[in-house]
Image (spheres, helix red, strand yellow):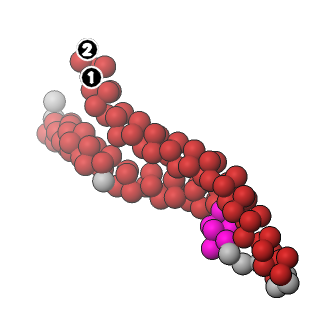
Amino acid sequence: MNSVVKQSTFVIILDLVKEIAYFPLWWYSRGVEKYWQWAWDRIKNWDDFLAFRIMFLNLYRPLYGDYSLVGILIGPVIRTIWFLFLLPPMLIGLLLFIFLFLGYLAIPPLSIYMLFK
């Protein structure tokens, strides 16, 4: 075996060992950051679809800018009902992303456990 083949094999094995050693560091740092960025984008899209934040911020304003007595009285009531109607889907979505995150964190240890089981 010539020197170039030995050197190339050594570099490939060294690179493989480096990647295997770096994987947990990436998974629990950069991978977590990427997951939460993805999850936050989905939560923001869900919020835009349901108008949850807008409903919360305008909770005590009259509906459609109607500043008559009826508009002032009925606006907060309707928005509170609407807010309470939108709260469960938002909480379910948030709990889903937390559950997925815990699954994401458990994948490497479970993989190692199943590999050596």
Give the side of residue 8 with respect to residue 84, left or right: left
- Name the spot of residue 88 as percent of width and height, x first: 62, 48
Dot 2 falls on a residue whose secondary structure is loop
Name which quarter of the figure residue 113 lies in.
top left
List x then y, in percent, for residue 65.
82, 82
Residue in view at x 52 percent, y 42 percent: 96
Q: Residues within 10 Å of mark 2 (few under 14, many from 20)?
A: few
In the rendered image, residue 40 lying in the magenta stretch gets the answer no
Residue 64 in view of the camera: no
User: Residue drawn 24% across and 18% down?
Assistant: 116
Q: Which residue is mark 1?
A: 113
On the image, the x and y values in percent for residue 12 come to 24, 40
What's the amino acid at mark 1?
Tyr
Classify residue 84 by image quadrant.
bottom right
* Residue type beneath disc 2: Lys
Which quadrant, please, contains the N terminus? Answer: top left
Q: Quadrant of the C terminus?
A: top left
Compared to residue 13, the image places residue 113 above or below, namely above
Give the residues drawn in magenta, as a range.
51-59
Q: Between residue 65 and residue 108, name the one nearer to us.
A: 65
